[in-house]
Image (cartoon, rainbow, N blue to C red):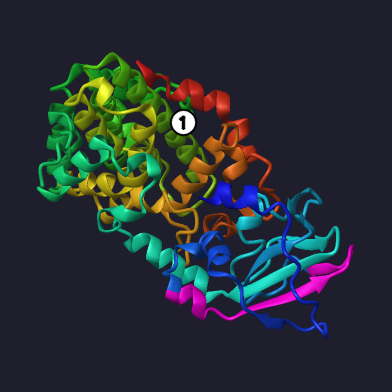
């Protein structure tokens, strides 16, 4: 929908010139507002009630300075703007592009400076609209809005059949391997390292991989260890629990169909990438546990598994690859939450599939586990074909909470880039 909108809107229709340097009030078409992200998620009646103002700038004029307080959400309507970071690096935003559909600034303090590169018009909306749109996105239930689904899904047997399976509570939820389940249950009690060793030793493959993890660069060990007891002692009980679950997940990414198995292995590789980036990024903070971030990254797209299982029950000619992609896009976040609830995951992990699917999720003022995974997802997509559709990094609440004002949206997170080789070696056991 947005891409079609942009193709039609080759140039913005000029808004009335304000008579003074202050903001002028105006009404914008509902169709235009619905293409602004993320506030376009608001119901049409709420969008129409928003107070919108406009201001014009000449080339070279400063629109706002980094560090200044802000109480509005700001978008480019026409012209070209340069956003400059504290380091001097920056990026351009031009009208009628994907970047122009995202805000130039969010939050209560401008993270970048904005300079008009041409005759430019800027529109301003209440900052409360951003918070409200995040709430709407979090509460969204795709089963209640099937009439708004993509064209590829309107007559899709795969999509509608899977939706009916959810409604009838006939969803096939993957089961964690026995060792992971036993350990998670036992950890509810006060148990010793010896007790954990007994449980983990029930699965020799997981036991050997746990020793491999303990000897990996992730833990920067000098003295190698060979015994499971020593590995668990080094890792700690909580980290052991998270790692056993993480290692166990690989067994779930399987399909009897050759075509679907290729797809599910692609999903697993994406999970590994996001998990490794989450681990490294969490290590740069003092508030998020890296081992927990690793597990969170691995389960962020777990909701795709039941969709693939359902697709196995259909003939390959019954659906297209596009239908499968769109079904993932619409349903995997909701299904992921269902799975983690059935696995009795803790609350901070429970909402990972849904929260990391919403770039502007801002449920808590402090940096959260979901913020780390969201930033890892952003970084993982920087080198992909969807890069041009990503929002500017500096507008994301997760980025603002991270507090590194030297990063620009067109740069990768340098600390993650530097750690790539170490992470690739450390997580090689997930690919076996």
The reply to whether the magenta stretch includes residue 57 is yes
Question: On the rendered image, what quadrant is the C terminus found in?
Answer: top left
Question: Residue 5 vs residue 430: left or right?
Answer: right
Q: Residue at x 20, y 35 (%)?
A: 193
168 to 416, vertically: above or below:
below
Left or right: 159 in relation to 234:
left
Position in image of residue 210 (x %, y %): 30, 25
Tell me where the magenta segment starts and ends, as one range. Answer: 45-63
Which residue in the structure is indicated by mark 1?
Answer: 273
The image quadrant of residue 361 is: bottom left
- Which residue is painted at 47% across and 67% down in the image? 365
Number of on-image labels: 1
Residue 154: x and y, percent? 32, 44
Q: What residue lies at 35% left-to-right and 18% top-to-bottom?
A: 262
Label 1, secondary structure: give it: helix
Residue at image coords 72%, 69%: 122
Q: Is residue 323 visible?
A: yes
**Placement of 252 over or under 373, stated as above or below:** above
Q: Position of residue 173 (x, y in %)?
A: 16, 38
Q: In front: 260, or 410?
A: 260
**Label 1: how many residues lie within 10 Å, few (<14), some (14-19) or many (20+)?**
many
């Amino acid at each position: 929908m947005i891409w079609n909108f942009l193709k039609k809107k080759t140039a913005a229709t000029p808004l009335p010139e304000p008579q003074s340097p202050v903001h002028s009030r105006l009404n914008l078409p509902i169709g235009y507002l619905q293409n602004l992200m993320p506030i376009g998620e608001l119901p049409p009646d709420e969008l129409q009630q928003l107070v919108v103002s406009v201001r014009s700038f000449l080339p070279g004029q400063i629109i706002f300075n980094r560090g200044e307080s802000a109480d509005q959400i700001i978008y480019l309507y026409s012209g070209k703007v340069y956003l400059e970071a504290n380091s001097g690096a920056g990026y351009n935003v031009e009208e009628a592009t994907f970047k122009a559909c995202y805000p130039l600034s969010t939050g209560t303090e401008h993270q970048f400076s904005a300079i008009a590169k041409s005759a430019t018009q800027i529109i301003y909306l209440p900052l409360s609209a951003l918070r409200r749109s995040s709430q709407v996105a979090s509460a969204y239930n795709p089963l209640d809005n099937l009439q708004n689904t993509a064209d590829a899904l309107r007559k899709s047997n795969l999509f509608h059949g899977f939706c009916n399976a959810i409604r009838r509570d006939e969803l096939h939820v993957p089961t964690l391997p026995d060792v992971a389940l036993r350990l998670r249950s036992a950890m509810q009690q006060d148990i010793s390292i010896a007790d954990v060793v007994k449980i983990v030793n029930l699965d020799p493959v997981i036991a050997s991989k746990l020793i491999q993890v303990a000897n990996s660069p992730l833990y920067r060990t000098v003295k190698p260890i060979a015994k499971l007891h020593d590995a668990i002692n080094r890792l700690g009980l909580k980290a052991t629990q998270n790692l056993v679950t993480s290692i166990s997940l690989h067994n779930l990414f399987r399909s009897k169909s050759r075509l679907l198995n290729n797809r599910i292995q692609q999903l697993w590789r994406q999970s590994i990438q996001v998990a490794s980036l989450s681990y490294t990024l969490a290590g740069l903070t003092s508030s998020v546990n890296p081992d927990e971030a690793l597990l969170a990254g691995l389960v962020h797209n777990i909701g795709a598994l039941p969709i693939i299982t359902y697709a196995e029950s259909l003939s390959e000619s019954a659906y297209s690859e596009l239908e499968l992609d769109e079904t993932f896009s619409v349903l995997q976040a909701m299904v992921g939450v269902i799975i983690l609830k059935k696995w009795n995951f803790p609350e901070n992990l429970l909402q990972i599939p849904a929260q990391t699917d919403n770039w502007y999720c801002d449920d808590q003022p402090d940096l959260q586990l979901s913020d780390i995974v969201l930033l890892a997802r952003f970084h993982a997509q920087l080198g992909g074909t969807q890069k041009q559709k990503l929002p500017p990094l500096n507008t994301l609440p997760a980025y603002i909470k991270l507090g590194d004002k030297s990063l620009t949206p067109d740069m990768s997170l340098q600390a993650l880039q530097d750690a790539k080789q170490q992470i690739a070696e450390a997580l090689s056991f997930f690919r076996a």
